[in-house]
Amino acid sequence: MIGAILTRRELTAWTVALLLVAALLVGVGFTSDDPDSALYADLSARLAAGPVERWIAPEWWGNWDHEGLFREHPAGVFLLPTLLGALGLPGVQAAYIVGVATALVSLVLIAAAIGRISSPADGRAALVLLQLMPLAFIFRIRANHEYPMLLCLVIAVIGIELARRSWRWIWITPVALTTAMLVKAAFVAVPLVAIGWWMLLDPLRAGGSAQRQVVALALAMGLMVATAIAYDAVYVRLTGESFWGGYWARQMAPLSIGVQAEGRPGVLHHLGFYALRMLWHPAPWSFALLAGAWRTRGRWTAWWNREDDTRRRALVFAAGFAVTTVLMLSMASRFAERYIFSPNYALAAAGIVVGLHTWPGLRRAIERLDARVPALPIVCWLLLILGRLALGPVLPRITD
């Protein structure tokens, strides 16, 4: 799948580029003034300096003026940075390196999926165009949950597609969903929504058995439950306290669902809040979706009937996943723009495909540039990373 949009030489070049960026982050002692990233990078560094058996039980260690056990989320997001830190990388920079790496792998897998769903040329163009939106600029170098969760979602969807074809892939979705649970607990609901829409629409129509997909989901549920129980048992043995009890008290108990608390914004406010972010963060590709719909007004049925069936189903998947996730999240009293990170990537991917097919000039421009610039997607990625390091203080910030 990846081979259709990147040559082996380009994959090697991107690996080298990633290593160079990692060395640069370490060399300049990169830190971020984003509060969440700074927090997670510091906790990863402190865990790396401590005993392995304590890696699942981070503390606040004075960050944000808090002390005691850190039970905002499970420790999944810390484990890989902590391992790299224990192996000798500076702990703080290791967290940002993992963030950059998960972002890169997510980009390649999403573009490869576009290449499989639409065409290799579309997937190749997406490698560049997905890097050119506010969402990518804002989250270019972070040490938080967004890209690990996006990567888990993409792998889980790929896994459920492969499970339909063969039993040997039955393990991918359970592992991806369990990893997502260990990264951000309740937010495993977001990749589950994506899987539900994918199974319903079956965009690729590649045959196989839907029963295997059901088995994969059942295994995922069982593995998540078993992992949660084992996690808490180890946590209690280490700390004398339950992780999930503390997590519930901190994160879930204060939530109200579908009920507007006094003095707090309600569901309609949340819907408007997310709608604005769904326009801005994936722009200009969100506007490409709207412009494409406007351009075909009055003849939508004819356009829809002419469109390739796989692309049609994939567009419905992206829209259904995004809308369902926003409706689900809007019911909760707590809201934040980062919560719809993965749905915004789905909208961006859909907008790119619509844009490439609605305005052929865009495709021709990308293809001409790709022909003239060796390894264009990699050059673009490297320049944007360097630009983020140089211009970071003046770039927009996550505000909610």
Image (cartoon, helix red, strand yellow):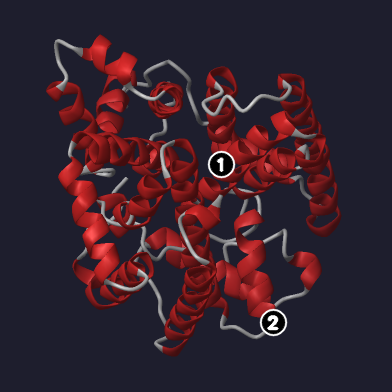
Rendered location of residue 102, percent (x, y): 52, 60
Residue bearing the label numbered 2 = 87
Mark 2 is on which residue type? Leu
Name which quarter of the figure residue 335 lies in: top left
Tell me the tag on residue 381. none
Rendered location of residue 95, percent (x, y): 53, 69
**Total numbered labels:** 2
Left or right position of 39 against 388: right
Rendered location of residue 71, percent (x, y): 62, 50
Which residue: 44% across, 25% down? 332
Q: CA distance from mark 2 to mark 1?
A: 28 Å
Rendered location of residue 180, percent (x, y): 62, 44
Which residue: 60% across, 23% down? 199
Q: Sequence order check: which comes first, mark 2 or mark 1?
A: 2
389 versus 36 height, above or below: below
Mark 1 is on which residue type? Leu
Residue bearing the label numbered 1 = 153
